[in-house]
Image (cartoon, rainbow, N blue to C red):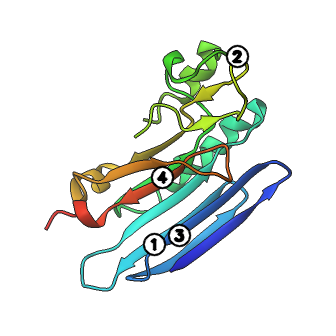
Amino acid sequence: MFCVCVPLEGRSGGITMLCQKEYMIHLRAFLRFHVDVDVLPANSVPGRWLTGFYGAAEISQRMYGWDTPKSLRNQSDAPWLCFGDFNEILYQHERTRAARPLRQIHDFRQFSGSKFTWCNKRRAPDAVRARLDRACANPAWVKRFPRYVVSHILSCQSDHKMMLVNMEAAESR
C-alpha cells in the first residue's frame, strides 16, 4: 500500500492519501495544503492524476488556497480528480446552525455519500454539521471514468469523514 501524509499544523490541516499496492504512484509534489500524485495501474491502462486538497481554515487565506487547484488543472490533460476538504459549502442547506455569508459561498461555487462530511463533535444544541469535503473532476476524468464513485466513510479520529475514491469498478473499457 502507498501512503503519503502531510502532518497537522496545530489542530488543523493534515492530508493522508492511501492507494492499493496494484498501482504505481509517482509523487508530483506535496505542500501544506495539497498532495499531488500520478497513479499508474500495473496493466497498460493509461494513468490518472489525483490531488488531495485541504482548504485553509482561516477565511482570509481560503481563496489563496483555492488558487492551488486552479493552477494545477492547467498542468496536464490527463484525467484529474481533486478531492478533499475545501472548507467551504456551495449552498446554505449544506450547513446546520451557523449560516455562512452568501458572498463567501459564491466565491467557492466555481468548484463543483453523505449530506454532511464534517461535524464539530458537539452534542445538540451546539452541534454544527457541514458538507466541506467533495471531489471535482476535469472533463477527461469524467469521460474516462463515467461511473466513478466517491464515498464518505465515518472516522473515529477526525472531525471529517474519510473519502474513498473507487475508480477500479467504474473504469470504462
Query: Hey, which quadrant is residue 121 in on the image?
Result: top right
The tag on residue 125 is 2
Q: Residue furthest front?
A: 123
Q: Picture coordinates of residue 132 (x, y %)?
A: 57, 36
Q: Is residue 134 above or below residue 91?
A: below
Q: Residue at x 62, y 72 (%)?
A: 4
Residue pointed to by mark 1: 38
Q: Amino acid at mark 2?
A: Pro
| Labels 3 and 1: the sequence-earlier one | 3
Residue pointed to by mark 4: 82
Q: Amino acid at mark 4?
A: Cys
Separation of residues labelled 3 and 2 (CA atoms): 35 Å
Q: Amino acid at mark 3?
A: Leu
Q: Which secondary structure, mark 2?
A: loop
Residue pointed to by mark 3: 18
Q: Which secondary structure, mark 3?
A: strand
Q: Residue furthest right?
A: 10
Query: For this rendering, which residue is in front, 126 or 78?
Result: 126
Q: Amino acid at mark 1?
A: Asp
| Labels 3 and 4: the sequence-earlier one | 3
Q: Residue at x 50, y 25 (%)?
A: 90
Tell us which disc is closer to us: 2 or 1.
2
Q: Residue at x 74, y 30 (%)?
A: 59
Tell us which disc is closer to us: 3 or 2.
2
Separation of residues labelled 2 and 4 (CA atoms): 34 Å
Q: Picture coordinates of residue 78 (x, y %)?
A: 35, 64
